[in-house]
Amino acid sequence: MKLPSKTKERKLFQEGYSHVVGIDEVGMGCLAGPVVVCAAVFGKDFFNTNHRALHGLRDSKLLAPHQRKVFSSALKQENIRFKVAYCSSRTIDRINIYQASRQAMRQVIRKLKIESKKKKVVVLVDGNKKIKDIPFAQEAIIKGDRKVFAIACASIIAKVFRDEMMGRYAKKFPGYGFEKHKGYGTKLHHARLIALGPSPIHRRSFSWAGKLL
């Protein structure tokens, strides 16, 4: 399996950038729960050091849950600066899932509080579209979570954060199995929706809603 490379980041540092920010989102295709975005910030020194605990790190979708937790903890122990933002199911229903994910991306950039005039920063975002209205250079990279180390790191932190949120929702709204499927459209989830009807965190603008509401 090909692991995410650090080549992109090292090239950008050679071009004079002081910081690279990797951004990824999770929960786009879920039937319930928020869309979550993480932004992870890396300086040049990080890429000049060997990090044994991060060997084998890759896109969160290619890792088992326990592996994601191990890597997420390791990243935090490396003192990597990161922030997380999210948009609720209500916001998703109001402005649509794409706009909600972009709103969360702009929010997480603001939370980083990087002074654009003092630092030369570049943002690497997973996908094929850049983020509108942010004050930094950026590059959209298709399948960036599988290709670029910084984005893969963001994907792991975002996924673990969201899974923990869904675990809490499972206790608040028992019977739906959120602790198992995390809001994705599995057979179990569809069966629980039919039996119980939608919970307050279900996305009523998604296609399932027309069949049940």
Image: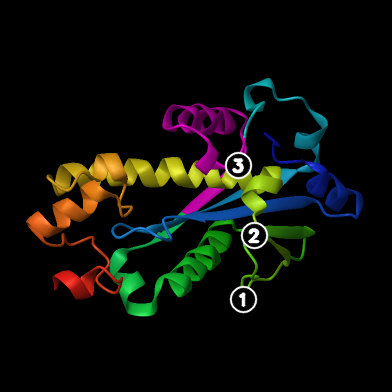
Residue corresponding to mark 3: 153
- Compared to residue 149, the image places residue 112 above or below, namely below
Tag 1 secondary structure: loop
Q: What is the x, y in percent for residue 106?
A: 54, 67
Q: CA distance from mark 1 to mark 2?
A: 12 Å
Describe residue 19's horizontal placement relative to residue 29 as left or right.
right
Q: Which of the marked residues, 2 or 3, is nearer the chain's N terminus?
A: 2
Asked whether 85 or 147 is in front, the reply is 147
Q: Amino acid at mark 2?
A: Val
Q: What is the x, y in percent for residue 67?
A: 49, 28
Q: Which residues are magenta?
A: 58-84
Describe residue 207's horizontal placement relative to residue 15 as left or right.
left
Mark identifier at residue 125: 2
Of badges 1 and 2, the one in the foreground is: 2
Mark identifier at residue 178: none
Q: What is the x, y in percent for residue 84?
A: 48, 52
Q: Residue at x 41, y 44 (%)?
A: 161
Q: CA distance from mark 2 to mark 3?
A: 12 Å
- Compared to residue 125, the image places residue 102 above or below, namely below
Q: Residues within 10 Å of mark 2 (few under 14, many from 20)?
A: many
Q: Amino acid at mark 3?
A: Cys
Residue 44 seen: yes
Q: Residue at x 62, y 62 (%)?
A: 127
Q: Which of the marked residues, 1 or 3, is nearer the chain's N terminus?
A: 1
Residue corresponding to mark 1: 132
